[in-house]
Image: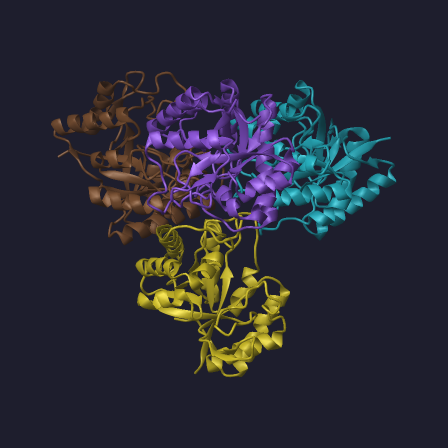
Chain colours: A cyan, B purple, C yellow, D brown
Amino acid sequence: MTQIDLNCDLGESYGVFKVGNDEEILPLVTSVNVACGYHAGDHNTMAKTVLSAKEHGARIGAHPGFSDLFGFGRRPIQTTPEDIYNFVFYQISALEGFCRLNEQTMQHVKPHGALFNMAVVDPIMSEAIAKAVKDANPDLVLFGLSGSELIKAGQKHGLKVANEVFADRTYQPDGTLTPRTSENALITDHEQAVKQVLQMVTTSTVTAVDGSIIPMKADTVCVHGDGEHALLFVKELRNHLTKQGIEITSIL
Amino acid sequence: MTQIDLNCDLGESYGVFKVGNDEEILPLVTSVNVACGYHAGDHNTMAKTVLSAKEHGARIGAHPGFSDLFGFGRRPIQTTPEDIYNFVFYQISALEGFCRLNEQTMQHVKPHGALFNMAVVDPIMSEAIAKAVKDANPDLVLFGLSGSELIKAGQKHGLKVANEVFADRTYQPDGTLTPRTSENALITDHEQAVKQVLQMVTTSTVTAVDGSIIPMKADTVCVHGDGEHALLFVKELRNHLTKQGIEITSIL
Amino acid sequence: MTQIDLNCDLGESYGVFKVGNDEEILPLVTSVNVACGYHAGDHNTMAKTVLSAKEHGARIGAHPGFSDLFGFGRRPIQTTPEDIYNFVFYQISALEGFCRLNEQTMQHVKPHGALFNMAVVDPIMSEAIAKAVKDANPDLVLFGLSGSELIKAGQKHGLKVANEVFADRTYQPDGTLTPRTSENALITDHEQAVKQVLQMVTTSTVTAVDGSIIPMKADTVCVHGDGEHALLFVKELRNHLTKQGIEITSIL
Amino acid sequence: MTQIDLNCDLGESYGVFKVGNDEEILPLVTSVNVACGYHAGDHNTMAKTVLSAKEHGARIGAHPGFSDLFGFGRRPIQTTPEDIYNFVFYQISALEGFCRLNEQTMQHVKPHGALFNMAVVDPIMSEAIAKAVKDANPDLVLFGLSGSELIKAGQKHGLKVANEVFADRTYQPDGTLTPRTSENALITDHEQAVKQVLQMVTTSTVTAVDGSIIPMKADTVCVHGDGEHALLFVKELRNHLTKQGIEITSIL
């Protein structure tokens, strides 16, 4: 039976600064990426989020990012591979503690924001991230953009990988995401977004912006929980996937 | 054979901001308290410090503190027991990762600065800290001021504890440290400092400022590595302890 | 004609972390306390907030707090008077730049959170704050809890002061606020809250929790903009004050 | 009479983290670039540094950087021109307060680290910085790498500019600094470094690494105070400049 994982970023609140609708999106996803206190999240939020994920039966992953709370980890910061290795390892270790405390086995690691995006095309950064994940725990699944350098680095290190695809972004003929600066970068029509996911899940292809059909492996779909609109879309997506006989389930 | 542990704070550098003489003090101590990125230290410093400690055969402990880099964790911050539990747990977990990576078993946890001092007399804070340590790993040794509330909380939770004493601080008749605001708070004479340690180690007593002899259990002595003077004192102390047939060794 | 100022905390968002309904509360108040980047706010939020306040004709004040983003400046931190003087001065100076840029004269300074609360009873902290305000600009108005040590320190330094009162908090016979830990600390009934403000504004007295009527000078009322409920209350308060012939106007 | 300014970064300590030998370098320079709390420095250090500079008669400038204490402002961070404008403006305003407090007129602004380096070739960043400086105070002098985009942006905005040159770095035929990754990037020989400065100051040219002589305007030389070696070099440089009849004096 064809399977797909739905993943979502969670636990991004910091102190009194609240972000997201964690309790509302949790029942709708199978994997959650928990912020670890560098770009967002804090020790209290992590404790609470791991507990919530456990209660909802969602699989937990670390969501390490740059130490840039102000920029929410979305701003590219040039740093060394050693620094990246160490801060990814630190963040995984911190979250792993809260997973153990709640008798949950951490499933995966998905880099956040600029770290995720830079790793798509940067084999050196990807190598540093993959090595940190493997050294933390070789059973962890590495989430990365489908077909990216990060996926390759994970495979090279013998890690299980999960190719991530997007419902609401268009693809270029070379398999990369259309940059947000382009007019046709986003898919705002729910129906079209669902259709794209179904194609990726069932045929392992996607139709690029020029109409060409290209290979696109889909192990997990990134969804969002901020706002009624986003929540509604996830519900629609779940319905369509289920109707097509696709099982929505976590990676492990 | 009588034994004593010598412990020292380590890994307190942050980015380009360098603190301490880690490489010079390391060969002289048996246990090191490694900063975990909240009041000092960072992921790179932690990685390097754990490796150095391993190479020198020193036992490693976590040194959690308030998230107050500017105040170096020395300023009392009023917060909740839940917050304390979570940030102590987070910091232990992060350092534990680097210990595992280097095949080192973490020996202990010693709270830093204001967290340490507040816990001396605060049973609620001590309870939160002891519980976090136990939940992280029940085999960890809890370091606290000799006879303090923290020691009691650790014992209550079934943790092995290490009563910490000071060579360079005088004691009140009730067993507390003379406040630094008092004239006679510090022992600046090396000979007298060594004598105080020998008394504590061999007789489990200390002579208070009023001349009375009071019980004072000594499992570990806190020493410092900042400056030639401090390093020289540690060497002297080691010589005297060894001459007296006291074994300088870690707690576990 | 009797006058009263309505003040509100503003500009508390940090990076992508959004706090408050600044645009909705702005038309309803006469003075705004703008966060300066230590406990909340950032340079971008400050730039935007000063511009918004100017457009709405609200008078601008600095809202300095402890450098504790995680605790939102609400946690008491023990530090020195020199440190307090310097961080209050720094924050005033930073905001003053944005006021000058927008051709606005800064009206006032109101310490935030724990800094405000600690200063109520601490003459040394109050002295440090008042001196920083005076040294920054002797024409600034110092906002403090009505009758507090901060008000006294401001007067001692020759500053114009504004006694702040609360609509939604009850008072003790000695003029202090009933601690939030007490059951009857908050006034949740709108009518009663409005009544309390009217009494304070028109008679300079308040009825304490034991029924006694005590002096309570009211120059400015602290209101909040977070949530529909809060906004509704401010509208009601404005209506009642206006009906009673009380002019709602800034301090200067 | 030919003149040259010697400038040095100052006030880079943060809390207990000490950086530099501020008191030793201060008597040797004519302009100081004071860190403003973003990449280094804090409100207490700023207060102290401005006072020290005043006592030594050095002219004071703001040294704004990225909000990256961990990276000491040396890591390129991608952000928007609005963000750059606002954080440069904020930092200038904060320091300007301490200058006013000490009756010192701020002389200049020199961006720090990655902000300085990125602005060399980036006209959009340079525009944001120059505009922030002008809006803060049109009398401020903008320090930038000799001939860089930042210098051009300053001139475009009608600011007085100071072309900065380096004693210990070699130049490419196009007037840029040889990248530190190249073998011949640094001039370690004191005599050669002094010779290069003399050539730049007296002839407004420099001999590039390929032997060609290119134009190089020199208004100020960047020197360092960290370490005996650096201090010694500044003394030698001062002696040689003075012997050649060149006046060492601030820009304004």
**Height in image: C62 above or below C209?**
above
x and y percent of residue A21 in the render? Answer: 68, 49
Quadrant that contains the C terminus of chain C? bottom left
x and y percent of residue A86 in the render? Answer: 55, 28
**Height in image: A11 above or below C142?**
above
Residue closer to the observer: D181 or B203: B203
- Please identify the residue farthest to the front as the structure is shown: B212
- Residue A111 falls in image quadrant: top right
Q: Residue at x 41, y 71 (%)?
A: C251
Q: Is residue C127 left or right of residue B70?
A: left
- Residue A104 falls in image quadrant: top right
Q: Is residue D66 left or right of residue C223?
A: left
- Residue D219 seen anywhere in this rendered image of the structure: no
Q: How many marks?
A: 0
Residue closer to the observer: B5 or C156: B5
- Residue D233 seen anywhere in this rendered image of the structure: yes
Residue closer to the observer: B1 or B227: B1
**Height in image: C73 above or below B53?**
below
x and y percent of residue B46 in the render? Answer: 51, 29
Quadrant that contains the N terminus of chain C? bottom left
Q: Residue at x 58, y 27 (%)?
A: B106
**Height in image: B83 above or below A64?**
below
